[in-house]
Image (spheres, rainbow, N blue to C red):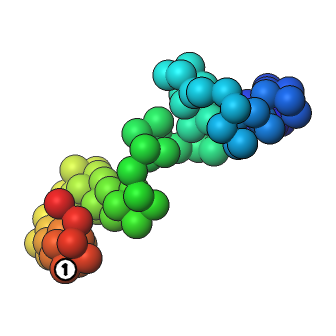
Amino acid sequence: MERTGWTKATTSQLVNGSQTFSPSVLKAAAEGLGLEPFELLIPPARAMAFRRFYAEAKQVVDTGTEAATYQNIVEIAGHRRIAGEK
């Protein structure tokens, strides 16, 4: 509630499903949790895989350590496929 600015009643209604969510609600929840909005719409394991992949890809761009980091990216992508994710 503190991170989103929602009242206790609004939070309760969203959690209990008596109030539908909208893009603005999704955005506020994501901002409050420090996530991207789409991460709230996909399974947590897939969101975490995306975050790991993104961090590794960013490291390649930021540091230029292509060989070692590229292998890490390939490993993460492989684990994702093994877990049945696309």
Q: Is residue 3 left or right of residue 72?
A: right
Horizontal and vertical percent position of residue 26: 55, 30
The structure residue drawn at horizontal position 39% and vertical position 51%, both measured from the top left corner, is: 42
Q: Is residue 55 left or right of residue 83?
A: right
User: Which of the 4 image quadrants contains residue 79?
Assistant: bottom left
In this view of the protein, which residue sits in the foreground, 54 or 67? 54
| Residue furthest to the front | 18
* On-image quarter of the N terminus: top right
In this view of the protein, which residue sits in the foreground, 73 or 67? 73
- Using the rendered image of the protein, determine whether residue 5 is visible from the camera's viewpoint: yes
The structure residue drawn at horizontal position 21% and vertical position 72%, both measured from the top left corner, is: 84
Horizontal and vertical percent position of residue 5: 79, 26
User: Dot 1 surroundings within 10 Å: few (below 14), some, or many (20 or more)?
Assistant: few
The structure residue drawn at horizontal position 63% and vertical position 44%, both measured from the top left corner, is: 33
User: Which of the 4 image quadrants contains residue 72?
Assistant: bottom left
* On-image quarter of the C terminus: bottom left
- Using the rendered image of the protein, determine whether residue 51 is visible from the camera's viewpoint: no
**Amino acid type shown at disc 1:** Ile
Q: Is residue 4 left or right of residue 8?
A: left
The residue that label 1 is drawn on is 82
Horizontal and vertical percent position of residue 67: 11, 72
The structure residue drawn at horizontal position 45% and vertical position 61%, both measured from the top left corner, is: 44
